[in-house]
Amino acid sequence: MKEEIFSQLTQVYRDVFSQPDLQIERQMTAKDIRGWDSMSHLTLIVTVEKVFGIRLSGSEVMRLKNVGDLADIIERKKQ
Amino acid sequence: MSDITIRRATDEDIPFLAKIILLSETSGSELYSYRTMFSDHDDNALLSGFERAFNNSVPGHPFSVSTYLVAEVDNKKVCAVSGYIESPDENSNDLITGALMDGFGTEAVLKAYQQNALQKETYIPRTPGTLQLSSGATLPGYRGLGVFSKVFYEHLAIAHAQGCTTAEFQAWLGNKAIDMYYRMGCELITEKKVILPDSRTAGKILMHIQTKNRPQ
């Protein structure tokens, strides 16, 4: 399940940031991704909610430090 | 002059801090503000949203209660200013977004961002490791007493003691407080201007001050 989530999450990042070849890694942060701003950050969260069928609160979003944290919370919410 | 006391904000101050955030956006020179971003909310709804946005324990952004110093004159809260150290990831904007999600709902925040192209055009990045001063205001009737500058310098002193050498803040072009900032020793770093449809020039400025640069 973890690999499947990460694969889907990779596609979400590629779509949101319009970078078809983007490779994400668990430790990546906003600074590692070209085009990251408040708007794309929020678009990413909304797209994650739609694709994975979960809801994320603002407080949960605020505690996300990197891509790995986002993958982990998706996995927890999907269980 | 009345006694001015300064203390760190607590959760009990949240309604006051919400009012300060709203007040900090009333210079008249703002190209956008929370009022324009959430234009279908009246002031009472905005204040309620801000109060909900404070319901988090994540530090490092102006919806974190512990970033505020509150000034009281004769035991009345009259001024507050947020001050926090920008993280190496420069993520305070993302934290603000998360707080607004709790305050106003994800869809409302997304709509507000989508309708606000000027936000991108006037964006000035914050420098990691600097003290970020924001969301500060003094209640009408208590201005001109030196309350704001006292809180401002107290933030500098605290940051200096923690090894932070520089404070930054942003202001809208035309904000009358900018003259006061110059008199306090602040320097202009950069401007981000836009030409409006009516040909007016507007925008934001970034100012800074060394944290050691304060009255003894």
Image (tube, coloured by chain):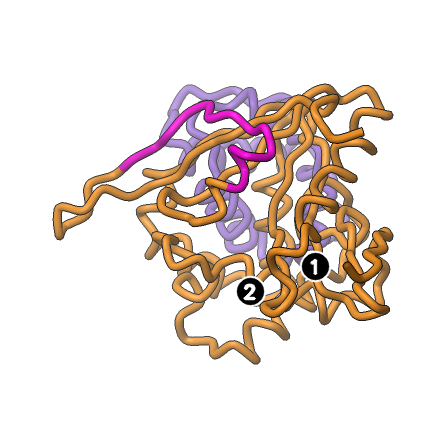
Chain colours: A purple, B orange
Q: Say left or right for B74 vs B110.
A: right
Who's the residue at 81% across and 56% down the image?
Answer: B4
Q: Say left or right for B41 vs B78.
A: left
Mark identifier at residue B96: none
User: Closer to the camera, A20 or B78?
Assistant: B78
Estimate the spatial distance between the alpha carbons at disc 2 and disc 1, rounded to whole Å.
12 Å
Amino acid at pointer 1: Cys
Which class describes the residues within 10 Å of circle 1: few (<14), some (14-19), or many (20+)?
Answer: many
Q: Secondary structure at mark 2?
A: helix
**Residue of label 1:** B79
Camera-nearest label, 2 or 1: 1
Q: Secondary structure at mark 1?
A: strand
Magenta span? B180-193
Who's the residue at 46% across and 26% down the image?
Answer: B188
| Magenta stretch contains residue B190 | yes
Q: Are marks 2 and 1 on the same chain?
A: yes
User: Closer to the camera, A72 or B160?
Assistant: B160
